[in-house]
C-alpha cells in the first residue's frame, strides 16, 4: 500500500529534475548518454534535464532529484563544485570509471610527481592539482554506473527504474558471465591477460567478444578473488609488475583498498 | 532392428537433409576464428566436426539465454506465439543427451514449462557415441548415463551403426530409408561402455560436506561462473522486466540465465544472501549435481562431460578433490541445503 501511494504521489508530481555534471574527465561518459540517440526524445518526456554540459541553454536548478556526476576530483575547483552539487541533489550517481573507481587519471597516484610534472605541466603550473581520487572519498555516492565508457543501456535502465520508483538494480555478475553467454572462447586460455573473472559485467563483454582482453574498466566485483587471479596470471607467465599495472589501469585506488599492495613501490 | 549407414553415403545423407526445406540441421561446427566447437546450423558437410565434443553445450537451443515470456501493456498480457522450426541435432554425445534429459525432468517437475518444451518437441536428437574418453576431464562413466536419444550413431570404421531410440527417431529414419540398410549387428552393453571414463570414485558424497579438502578448490575459485554457463545440465534462471522507454507501463518479462556461483544468486528481499561465502556456493553446485538432484529424481544431474573443469580458468578438478577425501572418518554432519 505504501509503495503504491508513493508511486501515485510521484505520478502526480512533476517529472524528476535531473542534472548531468562533469568534473575532471574526458566527458565521454556524458557522450554515452547521448549515444541513446533514438531514445532521447522519450527520455526528455520522462525526466526534466536541467543541466548538461553540452547544452548551453540549460542553466541548472536549485534542487535536483538526481545528478549524474562524471569525472574525478583532480583540482581544487572540482572538489568545490562536487560539494555544491551534492548539497543540491537528493541522489548522486557516479557515472563512469573515473567517478566510480578512479579510472585513467588516477594513474597519477602510482607515479612520482617529479617524473611527469615537467612533461605534462611544462608551463601551466597555475593548475591547483590534487591527488586524483574517485568522488566517493569526499561525498556520499548513492549509485555507481561504472565503465569506461559506461553502458548506454545501463544508464537508460537506471533512469527508467528511478522514474518508476523501483530500486535500481545493481549488476554484480562478472564479465565472464556475459562473455560465456556470448559464446566466446576463454581469452585466458589463449594466453591473454584478461581480467574478466574479477571485473563487474553488464557491458555485454564487448571487448572479449572482439578478441580484446578485459582491462577491468568496470571495477572489481564484490567478491573478486584477486589473490588467485594474480597467481593464475603469474602461472601463465606474466610479469608481476605487468599484471599489477594492468589491474590498476582503471581501478587502481579501489584495488589498492582490496588488498593489492600499495602503489608507491613501483614506477 | 539396427541400421547401417556406410561412410561413402554419409555425406550424401547429410547433404540431402541440408537441402530439405523447413528443417534446420544443427551439428558441431568448428569456428575458423577461434577453434571452438559449437552446435550451429550446418551449412555445408565439410564444416561438420565430430572429432571432439563441443566446447559449448547444446542447452542454449532449448533453454534460451534470453526468453521473452510475455509482453505487457498496462494490465494486458500477450504471450508471443512461437512456431519453432523442426530441428535435427546431429553429433550429440551421450553426456549431452543425458543432460538434456535432466533438463526435461527439471522443466517438467511441478510445472510444465511451455517455452522449453516447445523447442524440445520440435527437436530430433541424433547421438554420436564416444568409445573412449575424450580427455582427462571426462568422468561420464561414474555418473550412470542412460539411453536418451532418438537415433544413435556408432562409428564402426567403414560404417555407422544406427540404433533407434524413439518413435521420432524411427520416423526420421523411415523418411530417409534409402541411405540405410538393415542389419542384425548389435552392440552389447559391454561394448558401449565409454573406456577410462570412470574417474569419479565416490558414489555417495554426502559424508564429505565439511571435509577440509574443499578449501583447495574454493581458494582457486574466481567466481567467474564458467562452470555454470558451460554446464549442459545447469538450468537456473532469473526474471527481468524490461519496460519501454516510450511508455513505462509497457514492456516485456524476460527469463535469463543465472548462475549459482554468483554472490547475488541467493540474494533475497532485504538484501539477505543465503550463500554469501564462496565455499558454500562452490560446494552447492557440486552437491546439487551429484546429490540433491539424485535424492529427488533418482539420477545425477551431472552427466560427467567435464566442461566445468575444461572451461574453468584455474581448472579446478573437483573430481580429484573428491577422490582424495578419505572415508576413514566420515563426518556425521548432514549437508546443508
Image (spheres, coloured by chain):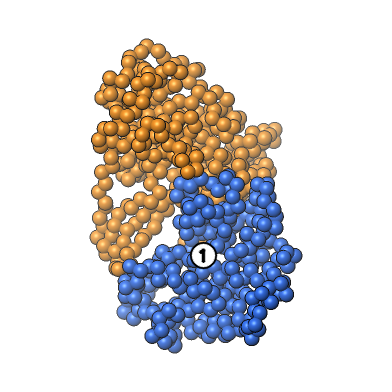
Answer above or below: position of A184 versus A163.
Answer: above
**Which of these two is toward me, B187 or B281?**
B187
Residue under the image location 65 percent in, 61 percent down: A245
Would residue B330 appear left or right of A83 to someone viewing this image?
A: right
Q: Tell me residue A91's x, y (percent).
A: 48, 77
Q: Tell me residue A193's x, y (percent).
A: 60, 52
Answer above or below: position of A241 versus B97.
Answer: below
Whether residue B144 is visible to the viewer of this picture, yes or no, is yes
Q: Tell me residue B159's x, y (percent).
A: 41, 18
Crowd around label 1: few <14 · some 14–19 · many ≥20 (10 Å): many
Residue under the image location 54 percent in, 30 percent down: B134
Residue marked by disc 1: A147
Q: Colour of chain B?
A: orange
Numbered disc 1: secondary structure: loop
Q: Tell me residue B42's x, y (percent).
A: 36, 36
**Which of these two is toward me, B85 or B107?**
B85
Figure disc tally: 1
Whether residue B89 is visible to the viewer of this picture, yes or no, is no
Q: What chain is tagged by disc 1? A: A
Residue under the image location 28 percent in, 32 percent down: B19
Q: Quadrant of the C terminus of chain A?
A: bottom right
Would residue A47 appear left or right of A170 to someone viewing this image?
A: left
Answer above or below: position of B232 versus B243.
Answer: above
| Residue sticking out furthest to the right | A265
**Which of these two is toward me, B167 or A70?**
A70
Q: What letter labels the chain drawn in blue?
A: A
Amino acid at each position: 500500500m505504501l509503495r503504491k501511494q508513493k508511486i501515485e504521489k510521484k505520478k502526480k508530481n512533476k517529472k524528476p529534475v535531473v542534472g548531468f555534471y562533469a568534473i575532471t574527465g574526458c566527458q565521454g561518459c556524458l557522450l554515452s548518454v547521448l549515444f541513446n540517440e533514438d531514445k532521447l526524445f522519450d527520455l526528455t518526456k520522462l525526466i526534466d534535464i536541467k543541466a548538461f554540459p553540452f547544452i548551453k541553454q540549460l542553466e541548472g536548478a536549485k534542487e535536483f532529484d538526481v545528478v549524474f556526476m562524471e569525472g574525478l576530483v583532480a583540482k581544487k575547483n572540482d572538489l568545490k563544485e562536487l560539494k555544491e552539487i551534492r548539497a543540491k541533489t537528493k541522489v548522486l550517481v557516479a557515472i563512469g570509471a573515473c567517478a566510480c573507481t578512479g579510472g585513467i587519471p588516477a594513474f597519477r597516484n602510482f607515479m612520482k610527481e617529479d617524473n611527469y610534472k615537467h612533461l605534462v605541466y611544462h608551463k601551466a603550473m597555475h593548475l591547483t592539482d590534487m591527488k586524483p581520487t574517485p568522488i566517493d572519498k569526499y561525498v556520499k555516492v548513492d549509485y555507481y554506473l561504472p565503465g569506461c565508457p559506461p553502458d548506454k543501456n545501463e544508464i537508460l535502465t537506471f533512469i527508467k527504474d528511478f522514474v518508476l520508483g523501483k530500486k535500481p538494480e545493481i549488476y554484480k555478475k562478472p564479465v565472464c558471465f556475459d562473455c560465456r553467454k556470448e559464446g566466446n572462447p576463454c581469452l585466458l586460455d589463449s594466453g591473454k591477460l584478461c581480467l574478466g573473472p574479477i571485473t563487474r559485467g553488464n557491458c555485454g563483454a564487448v571487448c572479449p567478444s572482439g578478441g580484446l582482453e578485459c582491462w577491468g574498466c568496470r571495477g572489481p566485483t564484490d567478491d573478486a578473488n584477486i589473490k588467485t587471479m594474480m597467481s593464475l596470471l603469474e602461472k601463465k607467465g606474466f610479469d608481476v609488475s605487468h599484471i599489477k599495472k594492468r589491474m590498476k589501469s582503471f581501478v587502481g585506488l579501489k584495488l589498492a583498498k582490496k588488498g593489492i599492495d600499495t602503489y608507491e613501490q613501483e614506477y | 532392428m539396427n541400421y547401417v549407414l556406410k561412410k561413402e553415403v554419409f555425406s550424401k545423407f547429410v547433404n540431402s537433409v541440408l537441402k530439405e526445406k523447413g528443417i534446420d540441421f544443427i551439428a558441431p561446427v568448428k569456428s575458423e576464428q577461434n577453434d571452438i566447437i559449437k552446435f550451429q546450423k550446418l551449412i555445408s558437410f565439410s564444416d561438420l566436426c565430430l572429432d571432439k565434443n563441443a566446447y559449448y553445450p547444446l542447452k542454449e537451443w532449448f533453454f534460451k539465454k534470453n526468453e521473452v515470456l510475455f509482453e505487457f501493456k498496462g494490465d494486458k498480457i500477450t504471450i508471443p506465439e512461437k512456431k519453432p522450426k523442426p530441428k535435427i541435432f546431429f553429433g550429440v554425445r551421450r553426456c549431452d543427451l543425458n543432460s538434456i534429459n535432466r533438463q526435461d525432468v527439471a522443466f517438467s517437475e511441478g510445472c510444465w514449462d511451455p517455452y522449453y518444451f516447445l523447442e524440445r518437441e520440435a527437436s530430433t536428437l541424433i547421438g554420436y557415441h564416444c568409445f573412449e574418453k575424450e580427455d582427462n576431464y571426462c568422468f561420464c562413466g561414474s555418473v550412470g548415463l542412460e539411453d536418451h536419444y532418438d537415433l544413435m550413431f556408432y562409428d564402426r570404421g567403414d560404417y555407422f551403426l544406427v540404433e533407434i531410440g524413439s518413435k521420432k527417431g524411427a520416423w526420421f529414419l523411415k523418411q530417409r530409408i534409402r541411405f540405410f540398410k538393415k542389419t542384425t549387428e548389435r552392440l552389447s552393453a559391454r561394448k558401449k561402455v565409454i573406456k577410462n571414463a570412470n574417474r569419479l570414485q565416490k558414489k555417495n558424497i554426502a559424508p564429505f560436506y565439511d571435509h577440509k579438502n574443499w578449501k583447495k578448490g574454493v581458494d582457486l575459485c574466481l567466481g567467474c561462473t564458467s562452470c555454470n554457463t558451460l554446464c549442459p545440465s545447469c538450468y537456473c534462471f532469473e526474471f527481468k522486466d524490461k519496460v519501454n522507454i516510450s511508455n513505462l507501463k509497457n514492456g516485456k518479462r524476460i527469463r535469463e540465465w543465472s548462475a549459482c556461483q554468483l554472490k547475488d544468486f541467493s540474494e533475497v528481499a532485504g538484501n539477505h544472501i543465503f550463500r554469501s561465502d564462496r565455499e558454500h556456493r562452490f560446494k552447492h553446485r557440486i552437491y546439487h549435481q551429484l546429490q540433491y538432484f539424485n535424492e529427488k529424481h533418482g539420477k545425477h544431474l551431472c552427466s560427467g562431460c567435464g566442461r566445468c573443469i575444461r572451461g574453468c580458468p584455474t581448472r579446478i578438478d573437483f573430481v580429484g578433490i573428491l577422490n582424495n577425501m578419505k572415508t576413514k572418518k566420515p563426518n556425521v554432519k548432514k549437508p546443508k541445503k
